[in-house]
Image (spheres, rainbow, N blue to C red):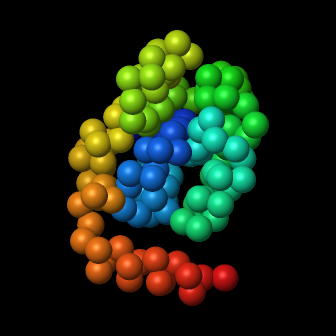
Amino acid sequence: MNGSGDMTLAFELSALEELAKPGTVFEDARRWSKYVGVVSDKPTYVVTNFTRKNRIRQDFFSGPKGKGESLESVREQFDTDRHVFVGTTDDDRELADEYEWEFLDVTEAAEAAEWQLADEVDDDEQAAEEDQRDDWP
């Protein structure tokens, strides 16, 4: 994924959950995105807990709004040349089209950016990483 720095990148929460190291992915995405955030239909506390646990600093999140309303709001607030939505389902793809975002499936994004998917990580490596996160304040 060699995009321009003038891009807004939104991850569907379920897409982040499919990645082995979502915090690292966010840091990586910041190198070629101006704004990076999370969009989800789940309650705000679910997104907040996930991002805190994975040390993700997001520029925006959906809050109590639905994904469509969030994509529309983010597009209005963050004026960049590109708006890319990383998701997991056909519904996510349709939502991106409806709100004039580019859609990228998380597996395609992971392959292009050389991010590791969670199902590619062995259990010992995953346990070591979780222990490391637990040590973080």
Task: Report if residue 61 is visible in the image.
Answer: yes
Front residue of 28 and 69: 69
Side (left or right) of 106 relative to 55:
left
Q: Position of residue 90 (x, y in %)?
A: 38, 23
- Residue 90, above or below 6: above
- Residue 36, above or below 133: above
Side (left or right) of 137 relative to 105:
right
Q: Position of residue 27 (x, y in %)?
A: 49, 60
Task: Report if residue 28 is visible in the image.
Answer: no
**Residue occupying image coordinates x 61% and y 29%:** 67
Q: Extreme top residue here?
A: 98
**Residue occupying image coordinates x 43% and y 36%:** 86
Side (left or right) of 72 relative to 92:
right
**Residue occupying image coordinates x 59% and y 67%:** 53
Q: How many marks?
A: 0
Quadrant in which the N terminus appears = top left
- Residue 76, above or below 124: above
Q: Position of residue 40 (x, y in %)?
A: 60, 38
**Residue occupying image coordinates x 47% and y 84%:** 131
Side (left or right) of 32 relative to 116:
right
Front residue of 134 and 78: 134
Quadrant in which the C terminus appears = bottom right
Q: Position of residue 14 (x, y in %)?
A: 47, 44
Q: Extreme bottom residue here?
A: 135
Front residue of 80 and 59: 59
Q: Extreme right residue here?
A: 64
